């Protein structure tokens, strides 16, 4: 039998640390699944909305992805609520999820999804069920602004997402908009077909302008564990500025594509 | 009004709120630090006493009474702040660790003082409390009881304990130096032997843990140097037959 101090101090400590480490690893695994299925759902969005027509969209693939995301999100919430120190590990997957939702709303409506509406979707996802109807309702609301039936609405608290995450996820969404623009513009010639790309270009420019105003007001802006700060030269501020730079590059890429196509179009005339 | 203005206006409100809360948290932390200063000073004064003189500590100055009250007051004020749960938890754990270090250090000195004032050829020091004596190392259960907490986070406890090891090592060095200048008791250098054994036992305990790469692992990495330092002191003293009275950690 081990000594008393081992029994009183280190054996319970070992058990506690094991439990916490297992929970952390499980949360990271769940986070990876959320990231992976959000990415798959984004690819699905690109395919579903690649043609600009009024054809009825097949959402079955997206419904399946949402079902899985719902299950994982409720598992994540269960672990996170007992381990809020793991907030940092949650941020990445959550940003990917935000990227999916904001991009989904954008491709269908050319508008920014409201944060409040996004949280409503997450609340429904957290009430994960095996039935496809709630997920179908989320997608119909996201794409076609059809009201979600009251029976699916949920009051569960979303403890692991803050508006700061939404801002960071929005950055990632701009990259998808850029991809969509370039994909959309290639294969078309002439100004008429490029109207969509031009609208997307304008959208990103307006959004970039708002980000610029924000960084002028808060030069040291950063988001860590969902909390804003304003400390210049901090690690978080560097990440924020890096994302802003990538965003600017995305705009430049669309600009170049538009110029190339438009100028070559004039040449053929 | 562009579709973004409303959203970015909300973002600005949130930034302002977070910055205000950051200042409020810093102020609260500062207030706690100020309240803990007299107790830190008291623990520091104890480190200047020889082991057998530690019994003279007046119980009225024990931090075991005011610290739980200070912590309770702090927790209440923290609860009133409208900041995010993750911020609150972080600051609360940090504050509990600060208080725990003081309580555990006081416990160590008190126990050493009692053991050095009992009769016998060997100084016997209990590692943890038993039915007769108070242990030098407060256990997590004792600590949560002393701090008036429902339970204590083991991570916080283990971090605090490692800081107490630093106190034990510093106490050994300063006591050996002080006694080398004016020693008059046969039990004088025994403290080095006892502390070395306490730290070795703790090191053995920490080795039992599967630590991941975090702050606890970093602090634990320093423990082996502390243990080596004490072993060297004991070795040098033994080599010169300077430890006349045997010490034992039970």
Image: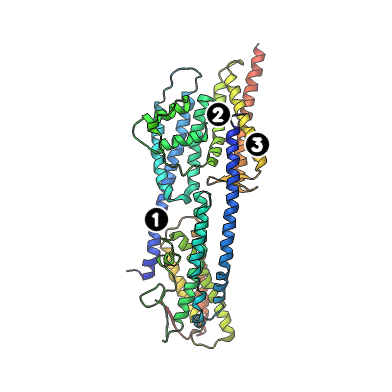
Q: Nearer the viewer, residue B222 or A140?
A: A140
Label 1 vs 2, first from the N-terminus? 1
Q: Of discs 2 and 3, which sits in the foreground?
A: 3
Q: Is residue A105 above or below residue A214?
A: above
Q: Residues within 10 Å of mark 3 (few under 14, many from 20)?
A: some
Label 3 vs 1, first from the N-terminus? 1
Chain letter belonging to callout 3 = A
- For the residues labelled 3 and 1, the Cα–Cα distance comes to 45 Å
- For the residues labelled 1 and 2, the Cα–Cα distance comes to 43 Å
The outermost residue toward the top is A269
Label disc, if present, on residue A177 of the rendered structure: 2
Chain letter belonging to callout 2 = A
Q: Where's residue B110, x and y in %?
A: 47, 76
Q: Are marks 1 and 2 in contact (CB under 8 Å)?
A: no
The outermost residue toward the left is A1
- Image quarter hosting the N terminus of chain B: top right
Under tag 1, what secondary structure? Answer: helix
Q: Residues within 10 Å of mark 1 (few under 14, many from 20)?
A: some
Q: Nearer the viewer, residue B73 or B160?
A: B73
On the question of residue A41 being in view, the answer is yes
Q: Which residue is mark 1?
A: A18
Q: Are marks 2 and 3 in contact (CB under 8 Å)?
A: no
Do badges 2 and 3 share one subunit?
A: yes
Q: Which residue is mark 3?
A: A212
Under tag 3, what secondary structure? Answer: helix
Q: Of discs 3 and 1, which sits in the foreground?
A: 3
Q: Where's residue B104, x and y in %?
A: 48, 69
Question: In the picture, residue A239 is in which quadrant?
Answer: top right
């Amino acid at each position: 039998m081990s000594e008393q101090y081992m029994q009183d101090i280190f054996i319970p400590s070992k058990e506690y640390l094991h439990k916490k480490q297992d929970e952390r690893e499980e949360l990271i695994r769940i986070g990876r699944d959320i990231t992976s299925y959000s990415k798959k759902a984004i690819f699905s969005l690109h395919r579903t909305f690649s043609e600009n027509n009024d054809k009825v969209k097949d959402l079955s693939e997206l419904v399946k992805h949402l079902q899985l995301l719902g299950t994982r999100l409720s598992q994540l919430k269960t672990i996170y609520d007992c381990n809020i120190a793991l907030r940092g590990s949650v941020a990445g997957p959550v940003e990917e999820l935000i990227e999916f939702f904001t991009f989904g709303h954008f491709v269908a409506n050319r508008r920014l999804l409201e944060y409040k509406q996004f949280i409503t979707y997450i609340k429904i996802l957290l009430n994960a069920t095996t039935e496809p109807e709630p997920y179908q309702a989320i997608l119909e609301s996201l794409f076609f602004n059809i009201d979600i039936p009251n029976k699916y609405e949920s009051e569960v608290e979303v403890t692991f997402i803050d508006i700061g995450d939404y801002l960071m996820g929005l950055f990632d969404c701009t990259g998808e908009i850029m991809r969509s623009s370039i994909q959309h513009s290639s294969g078309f010639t002439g100004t008429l077909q490029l109207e969509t790309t031009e609208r997307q270009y304008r959208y990103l420019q307006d959004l970039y302008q708002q980000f610029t105003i924000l960084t002028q007001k808060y030069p040291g802006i950063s988001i860590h564990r969902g909390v804003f700060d304003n400390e210049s030269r901090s690690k978080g501020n560097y990440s924020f500025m890096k994302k802003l730079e990538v965003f600017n590059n995305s705009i430049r890429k669309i600009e170049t594509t538009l110029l190339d196509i438009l100028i070559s179009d004039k040449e053929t005339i | 009004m562009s579709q973004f203005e409303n959203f970015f206006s909300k973002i600005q409100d949130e930034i302002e709120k977070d910055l205000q809360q950051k200042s409020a948290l810093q102020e609260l932390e500062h207030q706690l630090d100020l309240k803990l200063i007299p107790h830190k000073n008291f623990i520091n004064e104890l480190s200047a006493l020889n082991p057998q003189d530690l019994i003279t500590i007046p119980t009225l100055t024990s931090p075991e009474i005011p610290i739980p009250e200070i912590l309770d007051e702090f927790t209440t004020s923290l609860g009133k702040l409208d900041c995010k749960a993750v911020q609150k938890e972080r600051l609360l754990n940090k504050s509990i660790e600060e208080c725990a270090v003081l309580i555990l250090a006081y416990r160590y000195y008190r126990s050493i003082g009692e053991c050095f004032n009992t009769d016998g050829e060997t100084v016997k020091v209990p590692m943890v409390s038993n039915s007769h004596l108070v242990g030098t190392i407060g256990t997590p259960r004792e600590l949560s009881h002393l701090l008036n907490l429902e339970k204590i986070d083991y991570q916080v406890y283990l971090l605090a304990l490692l800081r107490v090891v630093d106190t034990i090592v510093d106490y050994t060095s300063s006591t050996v130096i002080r006694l080398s200048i004016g020693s008059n008791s046969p039990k004088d250098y025994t403290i080095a032997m006892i502390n070395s054994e306490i730290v070795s036992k703790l090191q053995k305990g920490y080795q039992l843990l599967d630590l991941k790469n975090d702050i606890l692992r970093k602090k634990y990495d320093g423990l082996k140097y502390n243990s080596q330092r004490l072993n060297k002191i004991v070795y040098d003293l033994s080599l010169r037959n300077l430890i006349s009275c045997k010490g034992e950690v039970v």
